Amino acid sequence: MALVVQKFGGTSLGDADRFRVIADHVSRTRRRGNDVVVVVSAMGKTTDDLVRLAAEVSAVQPARELDMLLSAGERVSMSLLVMALAGLGVDAVSYTGSQAGIITDTTHQKARIIEVKGDRLRESLAAGRVPVVAGFQGVSIDRDVTTLGRGGSDTTAVALAVALKADACEIYTDVSGVFSADPRIVPEARRLARLSFEEMLDIAASGGRVLALRSVEFARNHHVPLHVRSSFTWEPGTWVAEEDPSMEQPIVTAVTHDVSEAKVTVTGVPDRPGIAARLFRALADRTVNVDMIVQNMSLRGTTDISFTVPMVDLAASMEVANALAPEIGASEVLADDGIAKVSLVGAGMRTHPGVSATMFESLSDAGINIEMISTSPIRVSCVVRADRVEEAVQVIYRAFDLSAP
Ligand code: ASP
Ligand code: MG
């Protein structure tokens, strides 16, 4: 008998009917002879609504209380799904993250999983039940409820698959898999049947919104293959797994874009050891995830440092940079929230020169200015003006003829 973890996102749980549809699918999976552990997200836009509600109530939101609030959305889903399963005669039982034994550090809103105990889940499986676990949450080593960051239910699913040694981890969503570009921008974009963890990591990190980045890291580190698929059409989706060494890797796999970042520039920074260290340590202390960093060559002993951060961290980043600027002798700190990032990802680019040249040429032919560039072994990313990013995705996609079989 196989053990399958099935995770259903908020779009899969939009209304009462959907709970019955999902319960039916879980029940069929069981009838085919599998054990199932279910992980649920909050219904629809519940988490966004709770964030907004908190802001309406008070500008002061103690981190612990915000997590108490946000974790409630997944509780609603888990209990409703168990009711829907009970209606089909399936013996199921719900668990919060804390009851499931998901132990995290104490960083509210961005907690990291330290350990998954999972004893109650194992007991319930042994008793022939379907455990339904609230995603996106755990309990800290200080015994407070924590949340794992937006999109964190994916991470819950992977962590449970690892802890319970599941045979498969299925992530159900409203799209039928991972696409070679956002189909709303590139209508001819195709669904990718198979991706390596490395490619998926770079896609997730560069704006592909299908899977949360941390869940992919977790899956790669623990060798858990993921199957991303639709809970509306139920067709086979995209498998994310170890690179297949017997197959030649495509040079370019996907074009992604991200409009959720902003740029901070610190100008007139003295060019001497220790300056970047202080700036980025101070940002790290505020748990700001810095993405791209560019430092120019120094002219007359000073230089400029630009970096990108998630838009939600822009205010904190400006506070940090402004506080540090006089101390490090910088002249000015500038914020720019009109940027976007376009990226090209593909495992085969490791061994093929000329990929970035073609990408830059396609942007140049369209008259799109590149403001920053960064690369990984299998990704090239450019920061451009946000209002040109969709066009950038289209011209790059066509330059590489990504719809060709
Ligand atoms: N409900 C949470 C969110 O909206 C977690 C998730 O959906 O994975 O971010
Ligand atoms: Mg999600």
Image: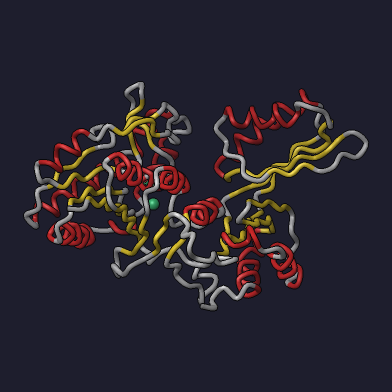
Residue displayed at 14% across by 40% down = 124
Q: Position of residue 287 (x, y in %)?
A: 55, 32
286 or 197, nearer to the observer: 197
- Say whether residue 133 is left or right of residue 350: left
Q: Quadrant of residue 266?
A: top right
Q: Which residue is outermost to the top? A: 142
337 versus 326 height, above or below: below
71 or 69, nearer to the observer: 71
Q: Position of residue 380 (x, y in %)?
A: 65, 57
Residue 86 visible, this orientation: yes
Q: Position of residue 111 (x, y in %)?
A: 42, 33
Q: Quadrant of residue 129?
A: top left
- Say whether residue 139 is left or right of residue 62: left
Residue displayed at 68% across by 57% down = 382
Task: Identify the coloring.
Answer: secondary structure
Q: Position of residue 168 (x, y in %)?
A: 30, 53
Residue displayed at 42% across by 34% down = 112
77 versus 366 height, above or below: above
Q: Which residue is outermost to the front? A: 246
Q: Which residue is outermost to the left? A: 89
- Say whether residue 286 is left or right of residue 196: right
- Say whether residue 89 is left or right of residue 400: left
Residue 49 visible, this orientation: no
> In this figure, what is the number of numbered marks?
0
Q: Quadrant of residue 87?
A: bottom left
105 versus 84 height, above or below: above
